């Protein structure tokens, strides 16, 4: 059996994946980086240290019992394909990929973390055909809130920013409100559980400027609600409704501006059921399955297979 190896060392997750392009099966292993209670993130030096510590055990787990061949390696080298996009934590994955490439004598293909997210989303719902077609891909996470026009001109994820947040990223807002409510970082899953237990009706209005959104106002409103004595459940629900309103509003304006293109939603924030259900009720869209929505190496493994097969 021949497989493709994917590596992703993002700001908060170490991940490794084996992808068999013949069967379509993946073996995915990942582990969150440890963040102390009450803190909103990690210094890059700490992220690099934890990736170095965690990557070997993930390789051991993913490759346990594997007796086939690695045909090529895909690795994320930067957050985005834009010039100047760089985070030190990605050098850990790139270094590991280069070492394995030399030892196994196989090629290494580099992709952005964002490209990996889009490919993982498409793989998870059986829509890799969209790699060759123009579509709109939302990447919504703690580090990015962007809508991208994806052009499949060469079978790859060539992207151009169509809309974006003008201040906070959606994941940042969710984490700030979550920590404010005493939840552990990253707060998405815990905040979703809290929000789903809310029995009150909660509404939120998006702040849009053209195709772009502004999200920082949501934190101010949440802080005011806390001072007023609103329940934690109510505030959590507000956070999710506020992000939903922003993404829905952006999507509607993009559709009016760009036409009826397929919409794909990826990134950790898009795994939230409240946000997903609202968008699915409003648009004909593709959502990454939850396990492939948060940071993972499946996308880089899939893209390595596509790149390798295109080069034959």
Image: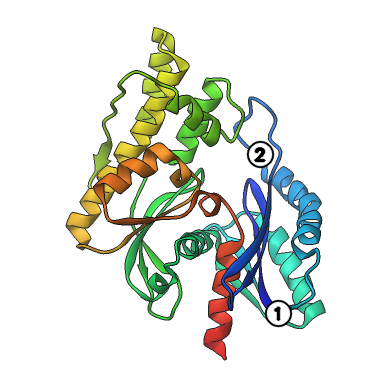
| Between discs 2 and 1, the one toward the N terminus | 1
Q: How many other residues sit within 10 Å of disc 2, few (<14), some (14-19) or many (≥20)?
A: some
- Quadrant in the picture for residue 261: bottom left
Measuring 42% from the left and 67% from the top, which residue is drawn there?
127
Dot 1 falls on a residue whose secondary structure is: loop
The answer to whether residue 33 shows anywhere in this view is yes
Dot 2 falls on a residue whose secondary structure is: loop
Question: Which residue, as the protein is rendered here, is positioned at the far bottom?
Answer: 312
Question: Left or right: 58 with respect to 30?
Answer: right
Q: Quadrant of the N terminus?
A: bottom right
Residue 278, placed above or below residue 289: above
Measuring 40% from the left and 73% from the top, which residue is drawn there?
129
Disc 1: which residue: 1
Measured in 3D between alpha carbons, the distance from the residue under mark 2 to the one under mark 1, in whole angstroms, is 39 Å
Q: Give the image location of residue 26, x and y in percent.
A: 62, 65
The answer to whether residue 166 shows anywhere in this view is no
* Dot label at residue 42: 2
Question: Left or right: 92 with respect to 25?
Answer: right
Front residue of 154 and 284 = 284
Residue 117, placed above or below residue 177: below
Question: How many numbered markers are drawn?
Answer: 2
Measuring 30% from the left and 63% from the top, which residue is drawn there?
262
Q: How many other residues sit within 10 Å of disc 1, few (<14), some (14-19) or many (≥20)?
A: few
Judged by depth in the image, the label closer to the viewer, 2 or 1, is: 1
Q: Give the image location of residue 99, x and y in percent.
A: 79, 71
Q: Quadrant of the C terminus?
A: bottom right
- Quadrant in the picture for residue 101: bottom right
């Amino acid at each position: 059996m021949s497989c493709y190896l994917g590596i992703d060392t993002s700001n908060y997750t170490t991940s490794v994946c084996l992808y068999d392009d013949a069967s379509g099966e993946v073996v995915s292993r990942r582990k969150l980086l440890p963040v102390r209670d009450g803190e909103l993130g990690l210094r890059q030096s700490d992220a690099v240290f934890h990736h170095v510590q965690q990557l070997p055990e993930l390789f051991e787990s993913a490759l346990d019992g594997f007796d086939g061949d690695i045909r090529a390696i895909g690795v994320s080298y930067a957050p985005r394909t834009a010039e100047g996009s760089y985070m030190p934590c990605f050098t850990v994955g790139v270094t590991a990929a280069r070492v394995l490439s030399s030892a196994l004598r196989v090629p290494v293909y580099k992709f952005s973390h964002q490209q990996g997210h889009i490919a993982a989303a498409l793989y998870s719902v059986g829509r890799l055909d969209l790699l060759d077609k123009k579509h709109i891909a939302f990447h919504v996470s703690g580090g990015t809130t962007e809508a991208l026009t994806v052009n499949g001109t060469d079978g790859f994820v060539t992207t151009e920013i169509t809309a974006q947040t003008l201040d906070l990223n959606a994941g940042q807002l969710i984490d700030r409100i979550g920590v404010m409510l005493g939840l552990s970082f990253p707060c998405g899953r815990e905040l979703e559980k809290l929000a789903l237990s809310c029995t009150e009706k909660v509404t939120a209005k998006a702040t849009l400027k053209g195709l772009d959104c502004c999200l920082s106002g949501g934190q101010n409103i949440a802080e005011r609600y806390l001072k007023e004595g609103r329940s934690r459940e109510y505030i959590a629900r507000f956070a999710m409704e506020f992000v939903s309103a922003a993404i829905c509003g952006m999507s509607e304006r993009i559709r009016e501006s760009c036409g009826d293109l397929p919409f794909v939603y990826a990134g950790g924030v898009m795994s939230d059921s409240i946000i997903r259900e609202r968008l699915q009720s409003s648009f004909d869209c593709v959502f990454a399955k939850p396990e492939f929505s948060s940071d993972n190496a499946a996308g880089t493994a899939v893209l390595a297979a596509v790149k390798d097969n295109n080069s034959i």
